[in-house]
Image (cartoon, rainbow, N blue to C red):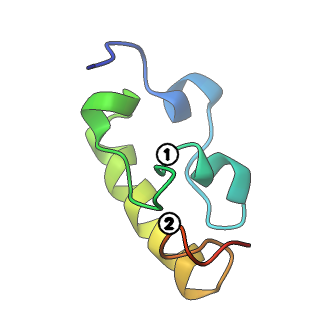
Amino acid sequence: MPVSTQCYFTQSGTKPDYKEVLTLKRFTSDRGKIIPQKYTGVSSKNQRLLAAEIKKARYMALLPYTDRHAI
């Protein structure tokens, strides 16, 4: 179900950051996949930044790659 709200990061005045694990988990599914922007309402620019920061957090073992690697 598409969401037509203002971008979470624009609204809060922040940028995606790999150290904010709880914020990043909000934009990943229970399987660990990145949720598409049409479901989260994040702007295109912030979606690209978000994807890069989630991948960075996964590489640093702050977020799991899949649901089988619980933190």
Q: Looking at the figure, which quarter contains the N terminus?
A: top left
Q: Are marks 1 and 2 in contact (CB under 8 Å)?
A: yes
In space, the residues marked 1 and 2 are separated at their CA atoms by 9 Å
The answer to whether 49 is drawn above or below residue 5 in the figure is below
| The residue positioned farthest toward the top in the image shown | 4
The amino acid beneath tag 1 is Phe
Query: Could you classify mark 2 by the number of other residues whose Cα lies within 10 Å: few (under 14), some (14-19), or many (20 or more)?
Result: many
Residue 54 to residue 50: above or below: below
The residue depicted at 36 percent of the width and 46 percent of the height is 35
The quarter of the displayed image where residue 60 is located: bottom right
Q: Quadrant of residue 5?
A: top left
Left or right: 34 in relation to 71: left
> Vertically, is 23 above or below 67?
above
The answer to whether residue 5 is left or right of residue 69 is: left
Residue on which the image places disc 1: 27
Q: Amino acid at mark 2?
A: Ile
Q: Nearer the viewer, residue 68 or 46?
A: 68
Q: Which residue is mark 2?
A: 54
Give the residue at x 74% y 73%: 71
The tally of labels here is 2
Q: Residues within 10 Å of mark 1 (few under 14, many from 20)?
A: many
Q: Residue at x 54, y 35 (%)?
A: 9
Q: Position of residue 26 (x, y in %)?
A: 58, 43
Residue 53 x/y as whole percent: 50, 66
Relative horizontal placement of residue 14, taking residue 67 as reference (left or right):
right
> Residue at 44% of width from left, 55% of height from top?
50
Instruction: Where is residue 23? Give x, y as percent.
Output: 65, 47
Secondary structure under the numbered disc 2 in the rendered image: helix
Q: Secondary structure at mark 1?
A: loop
